[in-house]
Image (cartoon, rainbow, N blue to C red):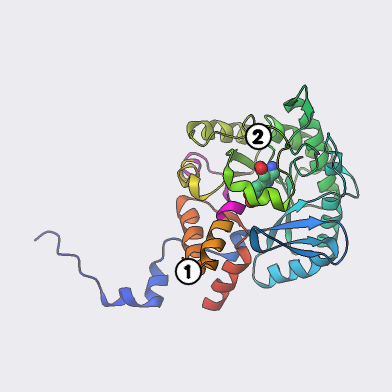
Amino acid sequence: MLFPDYRPRRLRKNEVFRALIQETRLSPAQLVYPLFIVPGKNKREEITSMPGVFRVSVDQLKKEAEECLELGVNSVILFGLPEKKDAMGSGAHKKDGIIQTAIRELKRSAPKLLVITDVCLCEYTDHGHCGCIINKEVDNDATLEILARTALSHAQAGVDMIAPSDMMDGRVAEIRATLDENNFESIPIMAYSVKYASAFYGPFREAADCAPQFGDRRSYQMDPANSREALREATLDVDEGADILMVKPAVAYLDIITKLRDEFDLPIAAYHVSGEYAMIKAAAEKGWIDGDRVMEETLLSIKRAGADIIITYFAKDMAKILKRRL
Ligand code: PBG
């Protein structure tokens, strides 16, 4: 016989052996933990729809950072809730705004931590859209300058990487040009290149208080039915100077992650978003699934699809399990 029957070998049952041949592996070094920052002091409020995730004030950041670093989760992405919102989202680029203050605090108290900022206006606009509104519509071009100014203010505060999530056309080029003109050539851009108009962002909008007050985000976020469009969006970002490409959400879009992985040689990030986290947490709380196992299986699937980096509210929980296995 040419091909002998396949026989399960004795070692397949052995944990050491399984680890030896494991194709995909999670590492805390490639997980990014999102932090929500609120004004005030001594604040640590749990987000109702995201059990285990807190909105914290700047004075709590040192502790948060130390916990992440201790677990090997060396990167965080920051979201801020400003004191005041207005139509133009001007709180996004204030020198002493919530995010700028948070960056300075993290760089001072935990210099080893890689600090990424989400650049978008929706947390700062009173209408909750990701850009400024002119004639009742989000105005792409008028928004670009505000986004670039925001990115620059983060750079001046000491951020390590900028992640524009607004989905305006041309924002990567505009931000890149502004950073370069101001001698921040070395700051990379992780672009939310493929961001779908998704219902999975629900809990985040509660957490960041940024649900649109009218209409929805479909004019600038992508249609879940489309995948070729994802390649076009990503190609634009690559041409404009993106250093890392992101797909968001993750699990409902694993095919898109794989497509981007095959098409581009840049690092690929995936955002396992708030709703994806909340679903697992809720089912686990009810005792309907084993939360830890579903978490790991989910994160592995994102890796297996081709993501290098995973932004996830599970970062610390996953890292704790990985650490116990060492
Ligand atoms: C800002 C932004 C959103 C998320 C990340 N950045 C909300 C949105 O686009 O509506 C969602 C992240 C999550 O759900 O965890 N535009």
Corner quadrant of residue 94: top right
| 198 relative to 39, above or below | above
Determine the residue located farthest toward the right in the rendered image. Answer: 96
Q: Residue at x 42, y 71 (%)?
A: 19
Left or right of 167 on screen, residue 43: right
Dot 2 alpha-carbon crowd within 10 angstroms: few under 14, some 14 to 19, many 20 or more = few
Whether the magenta-drawn stretch holds residue 262 is answered as yes
Of label 1 and label 2, which has the lower sequence position?
Answer: 2
Q: Bin the neighbour count of mark 1 within 10 Å (Cα to Cα): few under 14, some 14-19, many 20 and up.
A: some
Q: Is residue 298 left or right of residue 124?
A: left
**Above-or-below relation of 199 to 222:** below
Query: What amino acid is labelled 1 in the image?
Result: Asp
Residue 177 pos. (x, y %): 77, 34
| SS category of the residue bearing label 1 | loop
- Up the image or down, 22 lies above or below 146; here it is below
Question: Is residue 297 shown to the viewer in this render?
Answer: yes
Q: Position of residue 132 (x, y in %)?
A: 78, 31
Relative placement, left or right, of 5 versus 70 is left
Determine the residue located farthest toward the top in the rendered image: 135
Residue shown at 84% from the left, 61% from the top: 58
Mark-to-mark CA distance, 1 and 2: 34 Å
The kind of residue on which mark 2 rests is: Asp
- Does residue 273 show up? no
Q: Quadrant of residue 138?
A: top right
Numbered range of the magenta stretch: 260-276
Q: State the image coordinates of residue 12 (x, y, percent, origin top left).
A: 31, 73
Position of residue 148 measured from the top left corner of the image (x, y, whole percent): 79, 36
Mark 2 lies on residue: 216
User: Residue tagged by mark 1?
Assistant: 290
- Residue 122: which disc? none
Using the image as rendered, state which of residue 38 and residue 95 is in the foreground.
38
